[in-house]
Amino acid sequence: MSISRKWSAKQQRSLEILIRLKRLYPEATCTLNYETPVQLLVATILSAQCTDERVNQVTPGLFRQFPDAVAIASADIEVLETLVRSTGFYRNKAKNIQGACRMIVKEYGGQVPKQMDKLLKLPGVARKTANVVLAHAYGINQGVTVDTHVKRLSQRLGLTKHKDPIRIERDLMGLLPQQDWENWSIRLIYHGRAICKARKPDCDACVLADLCASADLAEKTTTTTQSWKTNATVPASD
Ligand code: SF4
């Protein structure tokens, strides 16, 4: 099969995967709680290596004391550290959310910018965080959010061979129309949490099994634990 025919077969398969995931998770949306773009940015920075559930336990207290960029920018760093402590890596996260808010106040009048290049200059913000903020705060599909679930599922489904999130994102952006980029990643995240778990994918219960390059993974998991470990990605953190 020529490369272009192979690619278009992959695009068709991706569309079918998306159709099924939309049916399965019709209401899928960002599970972080927030009221403003700044709060979403802060919550997303806090969600690194942490569950959304845990972040949602921390942010009500944080946003009660420091509801916007101005308040976070001038907060006592030790108070911030204490408030975000249970999300892990709290010193770094407190430093980043304060650094990002200071830049937002100084350069963007207290509003989170809507441009990818500007977002990427904020401390603690890489493409994953920027994509989440653009998609969910502003409705802008600028890229595909590649978190640990999207990375793992894209690899298992045979849609990318890459390990680097930037390259994975580039592959996925070529497979689906731009308006579906966030639809895609948010539903892969739901499916990764519910069915295609890092340690134990439930392939028997999976609606994507006939489209998946790793559909017998669950079986292999029980028979050849060692080889599975070699192929597995980092266990889900959220
Ligand atoms: S068939 Fe198995 S490996 Fe493939 S997406 Fe479903 S649960 Fe994951």
Image (cartoon, rainbow, N blue to C red):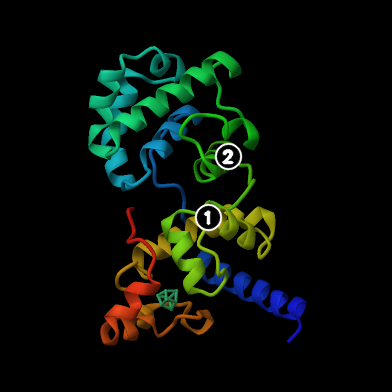
Percent x, y of residue 7: 70, 74
Percent x, y of residue 75: 34, 14
Quarter occupied by residue 120: top right
The circle on residue 165 is 1
Q: Which residue is mark 2?
A: 134
Q: Is residue 26 visible?
A: no
Q: CA distance from mark 2 to mark 1?
A: 18 Å
Give the camera-side residue of 157 and 205. 157
Residue type, mark 2 in image: Leu
Say above or below: 230 vs 193. below
Say above or below: 63 vs 164. above
Residue type, mark 1 in image: Pro
Q: Is residue 225 visible?
A: yes
Say which quadrant the N terminus sits in: bottom right
Q: Is residue 29 left or right of residue 118?
A: left
Say above or below: 179 vs 159. above
Q: Quadrant of ligand 1?
A: bottom left
* Secondary element at tag 1: helix
Q: Residue at x 53, y 38 (%)?
A: 133
Q: Residue at x 74, y 78 (%)?
A: 3
Sooner in the amino-acid sequence: mark 2 or mark 1: 2
Percent x, y of residue 82: 23, 25
Can you tell me whether the CB of the residue at mark 2 lies under 8 Å from the nearest atom of ligand 1?
Answer: no
Q: Tell me if mark 1 has few (under 14), some (14-19) or many (20+) residues whose alpha carbon lies within 10 angstroms of its own.
A: some
Q: Nearer the viewer, mark 2 or mark 1?
A: 1
Q: Tell me if mark 2 has few (under 14), some (14-19) or many (20+) residues whose alpha carbon lies within 10 angstroms of its own.
A: many
Say above or below: 207 vs 154. below
* Secondary element at tag 2: helix
Give the camera-side residue of 190 and 217. 217
Do tag 2 and tag 1 residues touch (Cβ < 8 Å)?
no
The circle on residue 217 is none
Counting labels gives 2
